[in-house]
Amino acid sequence: MKRAMRGFRWTPAQTGKEGLIRLVEQAQKSYKDEVTTRQKSYRRYVLDFTHSHQFHDANDAWSKNEHLKNYYTVIELLRKHESLIRKHFDHELLDKNGIIKLLNEFYAIDLSESATESDSSSPKNPAQAIQNANIKPLLDRHTLDLIVQLANEVCLFKEVLDADNIAICYAADTLQTVTSRNNSKLVLLLDKLASHNVITYNWQSVIAQKSLVISSSGKKLLTQHDMSSTLYRIKDTTPNAIDKQFLAIIDKYITLIKNKEV
């Protein structure tokens, strides 16, 4: 009775596969209530979900371990794969099959990134390197040309990209390292392309493993942690007029890519 008067509510541990699915369901409900309605930024939503779902009232070790395993799986998914989350959580209805599909995509990306990390420590032939570093087939020439045009139009790199040269190097998996002009704009652009299925969701891992981009400081190669941290930070920033213009240019090219126009 005293517990009820204090507003006590039993919070179960989310165990097993069903517990994992329930946590994802809870994450999507919070996303719909907070992000879709623009009450919170994605970053704030993730922080609040992280802080409000860690603890439960179960006392046995098995329940504690199972809950923590599922909890950290969902938190990693929310923190590191915003594009994947938005792709699935923006659906009107996300049922159990949809959640399983989301988790399978997440596991596939994680497996691909682990394979890429393993390959970087041992010599492989070029065909194997391409297969392990890319989660989806190579981009077609139309899409590649438009991405090059986009990068040049917004001055994404200190170098001016040549579409013919990029196409040849991309097909041979011999892309040269370029230098970012603005790391925030770089990750924002690539994240937006990934959210529209133009490029692979594991673009951060591919860029890092292949040493493709030097930081705008010119002092170091961009790591996956650098890109993930930068993206996480800017997602909580309200875009100004210049940012909105930048995003509008990206949207224009995404439309061209989808419509197969030049």
Image (cartoon, grey):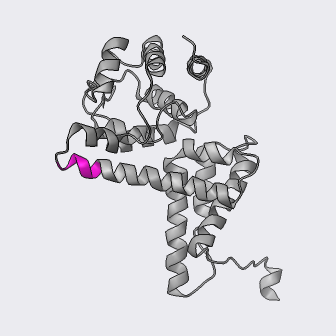
Of the 4 image quadrants, the one containing the C terminus is: top right
Q: Eyeballing the image, is 192 above or below 29?
A: above
Q: Is residue 83 left or right of residue 110?
A: right
Please state which of residues 231 and 261 is positioned toward the viewer in this rendering.
261
Q: Is residue 79 left or right of residue 179?
A: right
- Residue 188, given in percent of the width and then of the height, sits at 50, 30
- Residue 202, given in percent of the width and then of the height, sits at 43, 42
Name the dominant secondary structure of the magenta segment.
Answer: helix
Q: Eyeballing the image, is 104 above or below 209?
A: below
Residue under the point 58% across and 71% down: 17
Please state which of residues 28 and 95 is positioned toward the viewer in this rendering.
95
Residue under the point 26% across and 24% down: 176
Could you tell me if residue 217 is visible in this image? no
Please state which of residues 155 and 85 is positioned toward the viewer in this rendering.
85
Residue 120 is inside the magenta segment: yes
Q: Is residue 103 left or right of residue 178?
A: right
Q: Which residues are magenta?
A: 117-122
Could you tell me if residue 135 is visible in this image? yes
Of the 4 image quadrants, the one containing the N terminus is: bottom right
Residue under the point 62% across and 31% down: 238
Residue under the point 42% across and 19% down: 156
Quarter of the image holding residue 256?
top right
